[in-house]
Image (spheres, grey):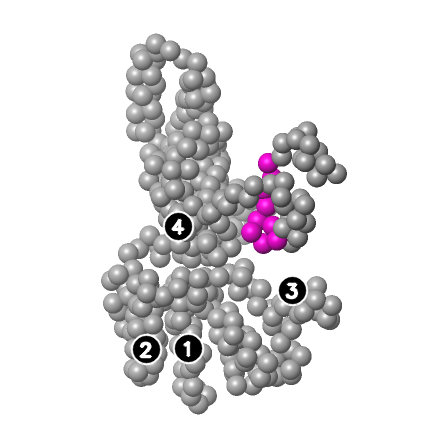
Amino acid sequence: MLKPMLACGTIQVAGATTFDEYPRTIEKDSALARRFQPIQVNEPNIEQTIAILRGLHGKYKSHHGVGIADSALVTAAQFAARHLSSERKMPDSAIDLVDEATSSLRLQQESKPEVLEALERQLITMQIELVNLKTETDAFSRDRRTDLEAQLQSKRSEHDGPMKKWQEYDASSMTSRKSSNALIMHGSNLRGTESLKDDTNKDEEEEDVLQAHDRVTSDDIVAVVSRSTGVPVRKLLRGERERLMHVEDELRKRIVGQYEALEAIGNAVRLSRAGLQNAKRPLASFLMAGSSGTGRTETAKALASFLFESDSALITFNMSEFSEQHSASRLLDAPAGYVGYDDEPQIAQVRRKPFSVVLFDEFEKASRPVHQTLLIG
């Protein structure tokens, strides 16, 4: 249907597809492929992504009504390339980080502070207990009721002051945000309004004094990345050079002995972190051989705790469950047309949580096809 109109020049079409889909859908139809001029759009690097984010800065600022620091844009591009490249491409991943961070900050500004919400929950709990105690007549309940009434009065005083200040600030900041949004939306039509801009800058400075967190910063971007990847915020922000110099010392806090094994693990971690390995490949692969009780599994747990600051970052597969030749399809994707093709393979949990240590426990009990598949992969 399109080919005759394209041949006659009746219409002009601009299409978009992926490198994988183009050979399957367009290139195999040579008559259709001749009507288009392929233009490769490669993934931008970090510097190009930062430039794209700066171009979109005003759009997200006006849409969400919050400011965005330039350092946050740089952090979004850097962290997207470092931590989200396995599943997403640039600049899409970096743009989503900025979008989620700005929307989260806007929700925080329009919601009660966590401190006030915690105080209100405590007040409700104490009021419920006080209502129940009023029906009791024993001495213990009377004493408890007297103490609880005093605590309740103190807690209300602790709550009412900050609550009043927050309500006053919320009302004033709402007016400021509306004025700021109006200026952002109509700024392109304003001319000769330098004095108005000066007043606005003064208002923004006063708002900074009232609330320091009035725009998206690098910390907000890091928090979004932490929620997406499961990597603790502290690890994302911390400089790793000092930690990497003492990998073995950290592992020895949990593993007694095994000096050669821990040294080999430490060297592999430092080699990977230094950028001397393919970033698309695993950090390292280890085959821990030894008798039961020598600390093989505990070493994997200690490594997960060191790298990702959580023992839950360890994904374990019991390879004795894959001793049959056909069981490889349960671990990996089954071929098309075979039983289990539509079922999610067990290895999918690694794709959902890529920042983790994967332990193939009792590896020798797996079937040979499983060994060969993992070797090739």
Amino acid on which disc 2 is placed: Ala
Q: Is residue 90 left or right of residue 371?
A: left
Q: Main secondary structure of the magenta part?
A: loop
Secondary structure state at the residue bearing disc 4: helix
Amino acid on which disc 1 is placed: Phe
The residue beneath circle 4 is 79
Mark 3, other Cα within 10 Å: few <14 / some 14–19 / many ≥20: some
Where does the N terminus fall, quadrant-wise? Answer: top right
Q: Which residues are magenta?
A: 14-23
The residue beneath circle 2 is 264
Which is nearer the eye, 312 or 24? 24
Q: Residue at x 59, y 84 (%)?
A: 367
Q: Position of residue 251 (x, y in %)?
A: 33, 73
Q: Earlier in the sequence, mark 3 or mark 2?
A: 2
Which is nearer the eye, 376 or 119? 376
Secondary structure state at the residue bearing disc 2: helix
Q: Residue furthest top?
A: 192
Which of the 4 image quadrants contains residue 295? bottom left
Q: CA distance from mark 3 to mark 2?
A: 35 Å
Secondary structure state at the residue bearing disc 3: loop
Q: Assess whether residue 16 is covered by the magenta stretch.
A: yes
The residue beneath circle 3 is 344
Q: Earlier in the sequence, mark 2 or mark 4?
A: 4
